[in-house]
Amino acid sequence: MRHERDCHRITVGVGNDLPDLQRHGLGFGRSLSDRWAAELYAIGTKTEGGSLDVDTFELEFKWQLSEQGEFAFDWGMVFELERETDEDVWEAGATLISARDFGRWSAVANLGVVYEWGSGVDDEFETELHLQTRFRYKERFEPAVELHAGQDTMALGPAFTGVYRASPGKKLRWNAGLFWGLDADSPDRVFKLNLEFEF
């Protein structure tokens, strides 16, 4: 089924002697086939006392490797290309997604590899791990616990997600979470909010 999406993402990190930082992303996505979808994001950064500066663009392709329920685990891949225009820094990444339902519980694991290059940075590979366990209470409200681990972040905390159906073919997906840093390199707290309208 073909569909289009409008997305807005907000991430705020505070504390731990790091400058308060907000990242806002506005995106547009479209399915290319039954198994492929593409999304394009413009991402802006706002530091404490500063204005919002759109400095990053991201192109993302999603590949559904298996049908839901076809195997014990559902599988997918995400390929990303990101450019920070202010510093001429590039990132290319690939993420393997695995999901499984256990009764009313769902577990999702994302394992990613990112290569970063450009001016002012060391050309290097980085790894990322994102885990979520979600209780499917109601379609509009599902509580979860998430763990996010990467080069500059190790954070754990509660999250909430849901879907509101406006009319046939139109729905609003939302996801919010509050995470606490688990090491000295991470912000003390990170708040995220994702809104996605599908039409």
Image (tube, rainbow, N blue to C red):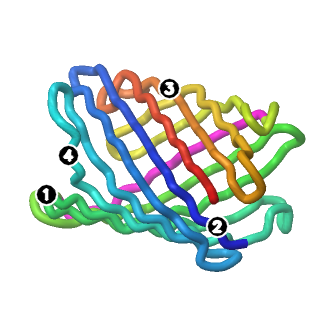
Q: Secondary structure at mark 4?
A: strand
**Image-based side of 191 in relation to 140, left or right:** left
Please give the label number shown on residue 87: 1
Q: Nearer the viewer, mark 3 or mark 2?
A: 2
Q: Which residue is outermost to the left?
A: 120
Boundaries of the magenta span: 122-135
Please tell me which of labels 2 and 1 falls first in the chain: 2
Determine the residue positioned at 22% across, 53% down: 55
In depth, the one of 14 and 107 nearer the eye is 14
Q: Nearer the viewer, mark 4 or mark 3?
A: 4
**Image-based side of 199 in relation to 25, left or right:** right
The span from disc 4 to disc 2 (Cα, nearest Å) is: 30 Å
Q: Which residue is mark 2?
A: 3
Please tell me which of labels 1 and 4 falls first in the chain: 4
- Check disc 3 and give the amino acid type: Leu
- Check disc 4 and give the amino acid type: Asp
- The C terminus: image quadrant: bottom right
Mark 1 and 4 residues: CB-CB less than 8 Å, in contact? no
Q: Nearer the viewer, mark 2 or mark 1?
A: 2
Q: Main secondary structure of the magenta part?
A: strand
Determine the residue positioned at 75% across, 71% down: 66
Q: Nearer the viewer, mark 1 or mark 4?
A: 4
Q: Residues within 10 Å of mark 3 (few under 14, many from 20)?
A: many
Determine the residue positioned at 31% across, 24% down: 14
Please give the label number shown on residue 178: 3
Please give the label number shown on residue 53: 4
Please tell me which of labels 4 and 3 falls first in the chain: 4
Please tell me which of labels 3 and 2 falls first in the chain: 2
